[in-house]
Image: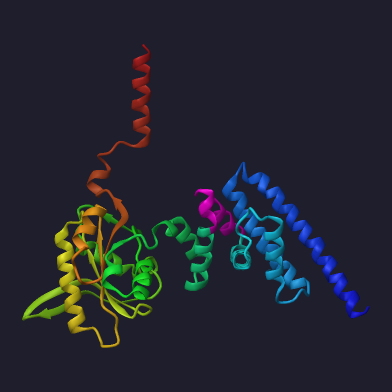
C-alpha cells in the first residue's frame, strides 16, 4: 500500500471515529437536560477514555488533539469545554480516575454542583492532582472535604501587603474553613489541646494545609526586649519562600487577635527571616468569624495575614454519654406520645 493510500485510510478511520464521538455528544446533550452534572462529567470521562485508546492504537500524529478540538468546536459551536487544553484535561482525568470506585465518587461529588461550575471544578481537581502528586486516597479525601469550595477563601489583606505575584499565590494557599476531621476533641478543651492534637497528627495536618508547608515547631520561643513569647505553630513555606505563623483560637474572632499576630510577624521578620526570604505570613484560625469584622481588623495592619475558621470532630465526655437517651429510647418515647395523642 502506497503512502497516499495509508494516509487516505487513516483519514477515513479518523472521520468514522469522529462521527461516533459526535453521536455520543449529541446523545449526552439530550441527557444533560435530565441529569446535567453527572452526564457532563461522564462525557468528559468518556472523551478522555476515547482519546487515550486512540492514541495507543492509531498513528494520527502529535497534532491529533488540536485537530480533534477544532472539529468538535466546529460541530458544536454553542457547547464549551472542547478546547485542546480541556481535552487534555479529559485525558488526564480518565487516566487518573480509571479506578471504578474513585470514578463513581468523583461523579457523585462533582455532580452535586451547578452545571456551569462543573468544568472549572473538574479542571481544579485534575490540576491539583497533577501539581501536588495526590494519590487516589488523597484525592478522594479532598473531594469529600469539598476542597474546591474552600481553596483561596480566607479573608486576607494580601493584595495590600504583598506584591501581586506573591499575593495571588498566597491567597490560593489559604483555605476557609480548614477541616480537621482527622482528630476528635472531648470538651472541655483549649487551644493548647488543639495544638497538641494537630502536631500528633502532623501528616494529616500538613495534608490539610497543602503543598509547601514545612513544620518548624509548636510553641516556638521568641525573645523580644527581654520578654518571652511563644508562637502556637511555626512553618516555612518552600514555594512562597517565607515563614508562616499560625495562631489558634478556640473561640470566635475578635480584632485583638489580629494585633497580636501582627506583632509576631514583626518579630519573626526581625529575628528569623533571611535576606532572601519573602515577608512572613500569618494565619489566624478561629472557630467562628464575621468577615466584615475581620476586614476592618486587617485593613490598616501592615503585615500580611489571613483569618479562617476551622472545624473538628467533638465528642461527649464519658460521664455524659450514659446520661443521654439511646435512639431506641427516643423512638419508644415518640411512639408513646403518638399513641397518647390518638386516644
Regarding residue 210, the answer to whether it shows in the image is: yes
Quadrant for the C terminus, please. top left
Q: Main secondary structure of the magenta part?
A: helix
Regarding residue 220, the answer to whether it shows in the image is: no
**Image point 63% across, 59% down: which residue?**
45
Q: Is residue 221 left or right of residue 130?
A: left
Give the x, y percent position of residue 30. Answer: 67, 44
Of 59 and 116, the residue lying toward us = 116
State yes or no: residue 117 in magenta: yes
State how the image is colored. rainbow
| Rendered image quadrant of residue 243 | bottom left
| Rendered image quadrant of residue 72 | bottom right
Of 135 and 337, the residue lying toward us = 135
| Residue sitting at the far left | 226
**Image point 51% across, 59% down: which residue?**
120
Q: Is residue 248 left or right of residue 68?
A: left
| Residue sitting at the far right | 1
Give the x, y percent position of residue 119. Answer: 55, 57
Give the x, y percent position of residue 7. Answer: 85, 74
Which segment did they paint magenta? 100-119
Mark count: 0
Amino acid at each position: 500500500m502506497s503512502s497516499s493510500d495509508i494516509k487516505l485510510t487513516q483519514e477515513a478511520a479518523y472521520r468514522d471515529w469522529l462521527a461516533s464521538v459526535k453521536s455520543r455528544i449529541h446523545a449526552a446533550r439530550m441527557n444533560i437536560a435530565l441529569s446535567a452534572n453527572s452526564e457532563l462529567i461522564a462525557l468528559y470521562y468518556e472523551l478522555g477514555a476515547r482519546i487515550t485508546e486512540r492514541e495507543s492504537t492509531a498513528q494520527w500524529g502529535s497534532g491529533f488533539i488540536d485537530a480533534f478540538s477544532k472539529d468538535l468546536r466546529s460541530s458544536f459551536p454553542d457547547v464549551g469545554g472542547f478546547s485542546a487544553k480541556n481535552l487534555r484535561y479529559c485525558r488526564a482525568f480518565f487516566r487518573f480516575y480509571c479506578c471504578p470506585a474513585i470514578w463513581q465518587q468523583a461523579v457523585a461529588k462533582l455532580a452535586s454542583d451547578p452545571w456551569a461550575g462543573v468544568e472549572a471544578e473538574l479542571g481544579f481537581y485534575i490540576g491539583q492532582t497533577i501539581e501536588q502528586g495526590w494519590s487516589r486516597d488523597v484525592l478522594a479525601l479532598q473531594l469529600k472535604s469539598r476542597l474546591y469550595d474552600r481553596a483561596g477563601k480566607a479573608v486576607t489583606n494580601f493584595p495590600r501587603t504583598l506584591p501581586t505575584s506573591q499575593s495571588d499565590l498566597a491567597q490560593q494557599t489559604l483555605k476557609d474553613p480548614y477541616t480537621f476531621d482527622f482528630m476528635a476533641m472531648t470538651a472541655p478543651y483549649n487551644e493548647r489541646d488543639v495544638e497538641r492534637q494537630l502536631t500528633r497528627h502532623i501528616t494529616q495536618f500538613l495534608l490539610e494545609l497543602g503543598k509547601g508547608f514545612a513544620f518548624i515547631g509548636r510553641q516556638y520561643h521568641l525573645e523580644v526586649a527581654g520578654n518571652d513569647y511563644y508562637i502556637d505553630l511555626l512553618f516555612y513555606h518552600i514555594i512562597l519562600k517565607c515563614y508562616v505563623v499560625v495562631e489558634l483560637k478556640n473561640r470566635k474572632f475578635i480584632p485583638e487577635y489580629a494585633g497580636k499576630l501582627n506583632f509576631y510577624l514583626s518579630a519573626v521578620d526581625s529575628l528569623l527571616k533571611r535576606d532572601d526570604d519573602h515577608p512572613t505570613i500569618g494565619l489566624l484560625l478561629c472557630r467562628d468569624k464575621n468577615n466584615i469584622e475581620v476586614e476592618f481588623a486587617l485593613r490598616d495592619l501592615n503585615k500580611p495575614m489571613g483569618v479562617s475558621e476551622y472545624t473538628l470532630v467533638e465528642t461527649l465526655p464519658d460521664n455524659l454519654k450514659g446520661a443521654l437517651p439511646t435512639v431506641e429510647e427516643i423512638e419508644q418515647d415518640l411512639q408513646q406520645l403518638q399513641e397518647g395523642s390518638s386516644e
